[in-house]
Amino acid sequence: MTTHICPITETSLEEAKQILLRGGTVAFPTETVYGLGADARSDEAVRSIYAIKGRPSDNPLIVHVHKDYALNSLVFDDMPYAKKLRDAFLPGPLTLVYRSKGAVSKIVSCGLDTLAVRVPQHEGAQRFLRYVDLPVAAPSANRSKHISPVTAQHVYGDLAGSVPLILDGGACSGGIESTVCDVTGPYPVILREGLVTREQIERVAGRCDVYHSREGEQVRSPGMKYKHYAPHCRTVLFAPDELERAVSYFSDREKNGERVLALCEHAVLQNFPKGKALDLGKNGEEFAANLYVLLHEAEERCDELIAVEPAERGGVMAGVLNRLRKACGAKQ
Ligand code: AMP
Ligand code: MG
């Protein structure tokens, strides 16, 4: 199969629609990462997403819709606070998990009785979703366990030959995946941390918990149990107070003739040799926006990436640290 990268135009949108209606897949941009979309109503189309990505079959997908799509055709929306969350954050990088009405393929939710729905803000994503006017099941457009794509070229690098069309909407601005929040209970519970923070949700809904699986318990957001987001190069991660150790580790490796790069926040960049440190930026939002771009760059340029956690905590840092730690080998 030949893979075409196309700007978002009437012609490419019509092509995208025809592909989806035939049960095929189309990659499209969102404000977080690129998605690999298929018609959520079709078992076969949804199955092909799992096959292309090599995604474990118990890791459910998020359904994407445009902002005027009739939500009540897909889910039961019985919690008053859910409307408040939609008014405050949608369209945007927040996925809400509702009780499903069973209107899409069961494979989307891997047999769970819930459905995760997202309304992305990205203009290209909205145009695409409005044009096709379907519920589009879409995980990130990368091979399972690799870093999520934030440019059309990243998608091409992972999926060329497996997907016929990549709609090119430029680089994603947010850079890490959406926050996934369960709205089936008396108060919202975050299942995956992301760009919309616990603090922001709490301010709107009055209360918000973050779910942590307990030993032996069935995981509520199955995707979170998998190692994710890892570059192909080796990685090592140091805590903010281990900077000195990171620097000497770096120079030991360099003396051995190894191709190493550091990844750290702007404030500590000068501790590493010029041109050998990737700059994550100055605050949580910048770290989130830069993380995947730099992980992609690292795997092109080095054998081992020596990362130092930024010191900032709270807000979007929960999502950033979760992704950075997973990229460096942590399971949770
Ligand atoms: P990805 O598509 O790779 O961004 O991953 C989607 C995330 O949403 C995973 O962490 C899934 O476990 C989570 N998710 C999707 N649908 C559901 C659902 N019905 N209930 C709980 N978590 C879900
Ligand atoms: Mg993913």
Image (cartoon, grey):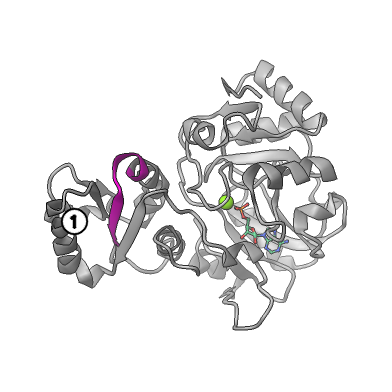
Name of the residue lying farthest toward the top:
11
Residue 189 placement: quadrant: bottom right
Q: Reply yes or no: does residue 330 show up in magenta.
A: no
**Where is residue 85 shown, x and y percent of the image?**
64, 60
Left of 235 or right of it: where is 39? right
* In front of the other: 295 or 290: 295
Residue in view at x 52 percent, y 46 percent: 32
Which residue is label 1 attached to? 253
Instruction: Give the structural element (helix, strand or loop) at label 1.
Output: helix
* In front of the other: 306 or 6: 306
Q: Is residue 194 visible?
A: yes
Give the residue type at disc 1: Arg
- Give the magenta-colored segment's residue range: 298-308
**Where is residue 118 shown, x and y percent of the image?**
67, 50
Residue in view at x 56 percent, y 54 percent: 178
Q: Is residue 309 visible?
A: no
Left of 251 or right of it: where is 140? right
**Where is residue 127 shown, x and y percent of the image?**
65, 30
Residue in view at x 80 percent, y 34 percent: 23
Residue in view at x 40 percent, y 47 percent: 289
Q: Residues within 10 Å of mark 1 (few under 14, many from 20)?
A: some
Q: Is residue 228 above or below residue 8?
A: below
Q: Which quarter of the rendering shows the N terminus?
A: top right
Name of the residue lying farthest toward the front:
256
